[in-house]
Amino acid sequence: MKKGVLRPGHVQIRVMDMQQALKHYVELLGLIKTHQDSQGRVYLKGWTEVERFSVVLVPAAVPGMDFMGFKVIDDQTLSRLALDLAAFGCQVEHIPAGELDFCGRRVRFLAPTGHWIELYAEKEYTGRWGVSETNPEAWPRGLRGMRAMSFDHCQLHGSNLPLTRELFVDVLGFHLSEQVLDANGNSVADWLSISIKAHDIAFVGDGNDGAFHHAGFLLETWETLLRAGDLLTMTDTSLDVGPTRHGITHGQSMYFFDPSGNRNEVFAGGDFHYPDQKPVTWHEKDLGKAIFYHSRMLNERFLTVMT
Amino acid sequence: MKPARLRIRERVSGAVFAVEQGSALLPAMEAARCQAIAVGCRNGGCGVCKVRVLQGDFDVGPMSRRHVSAAEQADGLALACRLYPRTDMEIERILEPVARKH
Ligand code: FES
Ligand SMILES: [Fe+2]
């Protein structure tokens, strides 16, 4: 938080069939549809999120992620970080307010892994969905499917991991929570946090520049995760792995695919990681246990299938 | 009336399996416990199930243009998870399916 970056704020995901995508993200995941803009983009949020949207679905011929956005503390911070990013050597673009409805101006930069990441300071505050701000009930009635609480993080694949780590830590104020080191001591995967969560973004250095591995959504408990697994079967949704536990972050997790082949994760629990805590290190030779703590076995699809 | 059972042959592996008319090829292959073609997202996004159609008629669902361009599609390339056979078919996988490793 020391550079003024607060938290993940949104992700724009490309889908080939909006009807199918909404069935998936709204009826199955349980996100709330809050808007559709003049470009045909649909805005969604998890019920615990206080801003108008956190997930934007955009119709496209190639699935994947357009960008992930982080909220910063104020407009001044946004201006300062735009300069810092440019000074670091990033390509920086300025997106005017209103390009995404309900969202203020955005500063977008190309991470060395080939992903567009953006920062914003303002977005319409709508409060949690379905519950009051005073004396709120525990949860709102009328949630659907998996009742996903919030958009939580993304895992992105590409090259230039050391430079990306430097950018996120030194320029944006993230801390490294976990890493996977190869036999030579070089990191092949970094988990980075801007909060006390075990991660807010993860990068895997496999040379697949710009690749979208998954967007993660928060569920309440392990029990809810099993129920989400039941729903995948009931809806014949394409499963990747789980429910299981990760070694890395120790979160409980399940992966599956949206109707355009973008991977989603739903997860519950996991470690906290305060900024003063040293990074947790995993060895690449033990990657099976690091990723899937129970089976201790990697599935090839998890490593190689992306959009 | 029961849907017709169509015979699919993958040339590289020599594997033969059946697909009911109206079903997609890749899930039918998985249901037959056949591993001739790599299985990824099963939803036309990742490209690992790409095949070349050597013979037969088929329809396709939405496929990522990154993995099958319009020209390739016209040339008989398709993603098996989005390929709906209408007749018996002979196809050829593009990628080797990778064995489960640990
Ligand atoms: S399995 Fe991903 S495109 Fe067919
Ligand atoms: Fe994740």
Image (cartoon, rainbow, N blue to C red):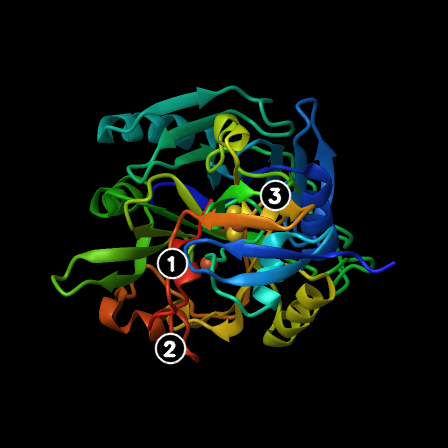
Per the image, label 3 sits on a secondary structure element best described as: loop
Q: Which residue is mark 3?
A: B56
Residue reaching furthest to the bottom: A294
Residue reaching furthest to the right: B1
Q: Nearer the viewer, mark 2 or mark 3?
A: 3
Q: Amino acid at mark 3?
A: Gly
Q: Which residue is mark 2?
A: A296
Q: Amino acid at mark 2?
A: Arg
Q: Which residue is mark 1?
A: A303
Q: Nearer the viewer, mark 3 or mark 1?
A: 3
Picture quarter containing residue A82? top left
Q: Quadrant of the N terminus of chain B?
A: bottom right
**Residue A126 in view (yes/no):** yes
> Is residue A82 rendered to the left or right of residue A53?
left
**Coordinates of residue A18 in the picture (x, y in percent):** 69, 38
**Coordinates of residue A116 in the picture (x, y in percent):** 41, 34
Q: CA distance from mark 2 to mark 1?
A: 14 Å
Q: CA distance from mark 2 to mark 3?
A: 42 Å
Q: Amino acid at mark 1?
A: Leu
Report the front residue among A63 and B2.
Answer: B2
Q: Chain of mark 3?
A: B
Q: Chain of mark 2?
A: A
Q: Chain of mark 1?
A: A
Is disc 2 in contact with disc 1, using a CB cutoff of under 8 Å?
Answer: no
